[in-house]
Amino acid sequence: MRETEVLVVGGGPAGLSAAIEAASFGAKVTLMDSDLALGGQLIKQTHKFFGSKNERAGTRGFKIAEELFKELKEREENIETFTNCTVTGYYKEDGVVSCVKGEDEYFHVKPKKIVMATGAQERIIPFPNNHLPGVYGAGAVQTLMNVYGVVPGERVLMVGAGNIGLIVSYQLMQAGVKVVGIVEAMNKIGGYWVHAAKVRRLGVPIYLRHTVKEAIGDRFVEGAVIQEIDEKFQPTGNEKKLDVDIICLAVGLTPTCELLWQAGCKMSFVPQLCGYVAQRDKNMRTSHPDIWVAGDAAGIEEASSAMVEGRIAGLGVVKALGYGAPEEIQGRLEEYHMRLADLRGGEVGAKIREGIALCSVESWEV
Amino acid sequence: MKLIEKHPILEYKHGRLVTFTFDGVPMQGYEGEPIAAALHANGVKVYRETPIRKQPRGFFCAIGKCSSCFMVVDGVPNVRTCITPLREGMKVETQRGKGIVKMDL
C-alpha cells in the first residue's frame, strides 16, 4: 500500500498552503484533488482580492494561485501531486484512505497525518423546474467561462446579491454575456458595495426582496419568472417574466465534510460558518489526533483566511511529526494567528468570530 | 464551438483539438478539458435523463459532487463528465436511467 507522511485532501487555497508549509519543513506530502487542475476556486477569480497587503490584497485570485503553484514547485521533491483523484473514504479502524483516480483506478493510501481541505459545495434553492439544464451553480458558471473559455449562455438571471452573485455577474459581463438581472430575497445587498456599484453602473437591475418563482422550459431553461416577496418571504403577487437561458445560483455554500464525519471527528452545526464543521483547536487539529482541517471545509469564509488556515494546519502537522525547530514553528504560528485575527477583525469579521468561538476548543489534551 | 473570443483579463490556453462523438454525432473539443465543457461549447445541454420521470439533467456543480452530469462514456455509465478529461475518439452518450455496468460474472 502507498504510504505518506502527510495527506492533504484538496488542492485549493487552503490545501496548497498546507502542503507548502508542511513540505518546507521536510515532511513528505501527498496532495490530492478531484479536479483536473489544482487551485480550487482561486483559478477562476479574475477580481482583485480585499483584505490586508499581507494576504495579497489587490492581486487577482488566479494570480495568487500562480504564486502558490510556484511555491509548490520549489518544494516539489517533498510534494507528490495527484489531480483528477477523488478521496472517497476514511477507514477509522486502520487510518487507511481510499481514493479513485479518474473513474476506475481505485487505490489505498496510509498517511500518518491528514489535512482535510475539501472546500465547499453550493447550495440550491427550491423552485419548480430547478432541475432543468441551465440552472447552474455560480462556481460552475465560473469554471465554464474563466477556466475553459466556454460561453455559458446568452442571457443570465443571477440569484443572490452576496459577493459571489455580484462578482460572477461582473465576470459574466467581462466574458460578453448579458446579465438580465439579479434577484435577492433580503431587502439589502449582501455583498460589498464596490462590487454592487460595478454591476449597477453597467445597468444591471438588482431586484431586492425578489426570488425565483419558477424556471420555464421543457428540456432546458428558456425563461424565468421572478416574484416580489414581503418581509415574511411570502409572495406579494408582483411577478415578472424574464427571457433568460441561464439561472445562476449564488445562494451560498456549505462546508464539504463527509470525510470528517467518516473519521468520527466531533462536529458542530454552526450557522455562522454555514453548516456542520469539525471542532478544532487553535492550530486546526480536529478531535481526531491525526486529522487537521482548513479552509472552507472548516467554515465558509474568504480565500484569504483559507490560505492562512492552511499554513497553520500545515505547521500543526509538522509540529506533531517532530519536524523543524520548535521555536521556529511557534514563531511562524504566532505570526499566522495574528494575520488571521487581522482578516477577521472589525465589523465584517464579527459573524465569523462568533462562529469560530462556537466550534473551538482550547486543547484536545486531557 | 461557442468560446469566449476576447477577455479583458484572461488568456485561454487550450490544448489539442480532438474529435469525439455525442450520441453518434461527431464533435470537436479540446483534449484534457472536461467532457462537459466540450459538450456545452457544442451547444449540448442535456446530458442524462432521470430513471423514473425521464427529466433532463445537465451541467450543474462542475466539481464532481452532484451527479447531474453523469453520462455513458466509452460504454461506461455514471461518468462524472465535469471532471473527466476529453480524449480523441471518445464515445459520449446520453445516459438514460441508472446506467448498466457491463461485466462478466
Image (cartoon, grey):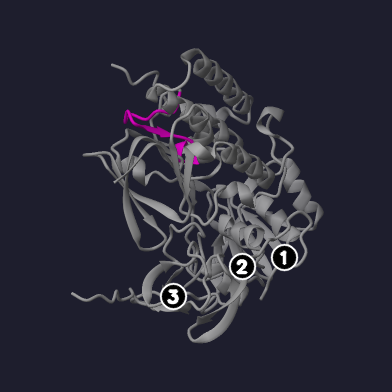
Instruction: Write the residue at 53% across / 40% down.
Output: A76
Instruction: Write the residue at 63% across / 67% down.
Output: A152
Q: CA distance from mark 3 to mark 2?
A: 18 Å
Q: Secondary structure at mark 3?
A: strand
The amino acid at mark 2 is Ile
**Which numbered circle lies on residue A177?**
1
Per the image, the residue denoted by label 2 is: A246
Per the image, the residue denoted by label 3 is: B48
Mark 3 vs mark 2: give the one in front. Answer: 3
Residue B18 lies, in percent from the top left, at: 59, 75
Instruction: Assess whether residue A297 is covered by the magenta stretch.
Output: yes
The amino acid at mark 3 is Arg
Give the position of the C terminus of chain A as an image quadrant. Answer: top left
Residues at discs 2 and 1 in contact (Cβ within 8 Å): yes
- In primary-sequence order, the first of circles 2 and 1 is 1
Q: Does A345 appear above or below A146?
A: above
Q: Does A86 appear above or below A24?
A: below
Image quadrant where residue B98 sits: bottom left
The amino acid at mark 1 is Val
- The region drawn magenta spans A283-298
